[in-house]
Each structure stands twice: as structure tokens, then as C-alpha cells.
């Protein structure tokens, strides 16, 4: 099993910044893609950004130029730097990781961290 623990959410005014962190721990495993999803009330969970193990990022169009994803493979950690936050960024943000344990790949989720952007 792989455990993902997020931190860094909170309340911020529009235009402000937050940095989310997610650390993976557990049994011996290899992590492929790590990323961040979000889910606003009444909406489906959506991909915000992810990054492959070799550092290739992908972003949701609406966050390009404002959010930056990075990861530290040695620490099994992924970060999301969020600048220029807007009220529509308000959601629960979930860390996700594709991890391979004994040859089996599964998608693991964190518990979520609330991000609230006030106008």
C-alpha cells in the first residue's frame, strides 16, 4: 500500500498564492506519474496538473501560467505552486500517484486538502 499525505491548503484572497505538498510513503514501490486533481462542490473531479517520473508536466488549460507542478523523486514528493489564485480555483485538492508494487500498478489518492479563494 502507498499512503499520500497532502498539506498546504487554506484560505487566501484572490490574487494570492498557496503551495501544496504531497508525500508518498509505504511499502517498497515505484512511482510513475504524480499529480493534483480538484473537486469543487457539485462538480466532477478534474485533473489540475501532473508530472511523469522524468519530469514532463501537464496542466489544465485554465491554470497554465499560474500554477507550477514540481516533484522531488528522492523524497517521493510532489508540489503544486499556485499563484494568481481565483475564486473559481476553490475546491478540495487531491494528490494522486500511479505506483507500482511487485509489478502491479494502481492509482492512489490522498485525503484531500481544502483550498478556498475569496473574492
Image (cartoon, rainbow, N blue to C red):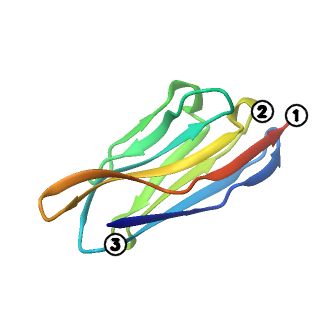
The residue indicated by pointer 2 is: 87
| Relative vertical location of residue 65 with respect to residue 35 in this rendering, above or below | above
Which residue: 72% across, 49% down? 17
Q: Which mark is residue 119?
A: 1
Q: Quadrant of residue 84?
A: top right
Q: Secondary structure at mark 1?
A: loop
- Give the camera-side residue of 15 and 27: 27
Q: Secondary structure at mark 3?
A: helix
Q: Secondary structure at mark 2?
A: helix
Mark 3 to mark 2 CA distance (whole Å): 34 Å
- Give the camera-side residue of 102 and 95: 102
Earlier-in-chain disc, 3 versus 2: 3
Earlier-in-chain disc, 1 versus 3: 3
| CB atoms of marks 2 and 1 within 8 Å | yes
Residue 94 vs residue 88: left or right? left
Which residue: 58% across, 41% down? 67
The residue indicated by pointer 3 is: 74
Residue 44 vs residue 102: left or right? right
Which residue: 57% across, 39% down? 38
Amino acid at each position: 500500500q502507498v499512503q499520500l499525505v497532502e498539506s498546504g491548503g487554506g484560505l487566501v484572497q484572490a490574487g494570492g498564492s498557496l503551495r501544496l505538498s504531497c508525500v508518498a510513503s509505504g511499502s517498497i514501490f515505484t512511482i510513475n506519474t504524480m499529480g493534483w486533481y480538484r473537486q469543487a462542490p457539485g462538480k466532477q473531479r478534474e485533473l489540475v496538473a501532473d508530472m511523469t517520473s522524468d519530469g514532463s508536466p501537464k496542466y489544465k488549460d485554465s491554470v497554465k501560467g499560474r500554477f507550477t507542478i514540481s516533484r522531488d523523486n528522492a523524497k517521493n514528493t510532489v508540489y503544486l505552486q499556485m499563484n494568481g489564485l481565483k475564486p473559481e480555483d476553490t475546491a478540495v485538492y487531491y494528490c494522486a500517484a500511479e505506483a507500482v508494487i511487485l509489478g502491479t500498478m494502481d492509482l492512489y489518492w490522498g485525503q484531500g486538502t481544502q483550498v478556498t479563494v475569496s473574492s
